[in-house]
Image: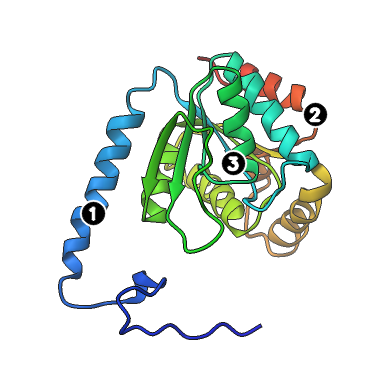
Amino acid sequence: MKYPLPNLNDENHQYWLDNFKVGDSWRLFRIISEFVEGFDTLSALSHPAVSIFGSARTSPDDHYYHLAQNIAGQLAEAGYPIMTGGGPGIMEAANKGASLADGISIGLNINLPFEQAPNPYANMPLEFKYFFVRKVMFIKYAMAFICLPGGFGTLDELFESLTLMQTRRIKPFPVILVGSEYWKGLVEWIKGQLLQKKNNINRDDLFLFNVIDDPDEVVSYVKRTVIM
């Protein structure tokens, strides 16, 4: 499938990041405002959150939707704020689970021309235009990452966290991949290609994440490793 090239002369085109022009430096004020709003809002949390990631395309009748809702609900009942990307699918499920448990349900929504619309279950919603600002919030205010099946966005957040821990830019925290059937190909590739064949990572790097299927075990692991 070929994607049409954007019309960079159209100020309303969706590829706004590519539209360089005089005055680009003024974007810094929008970027700063997003950082300030995010920091001011999330620094009020009494405890760091658990970030839950997964596909925006997951339907409410999907097994992983119910799994995300279950995990988020149990963690919220235990007092952990739940943070998601604020959109539909797995994000909606996690926000719903936290909300129904009367917990803190944070949704960091990103403005996109497709897929992403804020779900109604985030009782602490924030809007972002810039992915990199939003990613800072996920890292800075989370104590654990839980990744359910997702696409490029989920992988982006996953490898961002692993890279920052590997390079010791942040302290290690639990990164849990839920759904061994979904993640096993990626895990085998990491072990076979990155470690064994190319030696591009250290063996200790494999301990930066865990693969867990059972929702109760996920919750138990977070409780054991993350002290509130």
Residue type, mark 1 in image: Arg
Label located before the other in sequence (1 or 3): 1
- Nearest the viewer among 133 and 1 is 1
Counting other residues with Cα less than 10 Å from the Cα at mark 2, is it few (<14), some (14-19), or many (20 or more)? few
From the image, tell me which residue sits under label 3: 91
From the image, tell me which residue sits under label 1: 30
Identity of the residue drawn at 56% across and 82% down: 3
Q: Indicate which label's residue lies in the foreground, 2 or 1.
A: 1
Tell me the element at label 3.
helix
* Furthest-right residue in this view: 181
Q: Are marks 2 and 1 in contact (CB under 8 Å)?
A: no
Counting other residues with Cα less than 10 Å from the Cα at mark 1, is it few (<14), some (14-19), or many (20 or more)? some
Instruction: Tell me residue 105's x, y (percent).
Output: 50, 28
**Image quadrant containing the N terminus:** bottom right
Label located before the other in sequence (2 or 1): 1
Q: Indicate which label's residue lies in the foreground, 2 or 3.
A: 3
On residue 214, the disc is: 2
Going by the image, does 46 lie left or right of 160? left
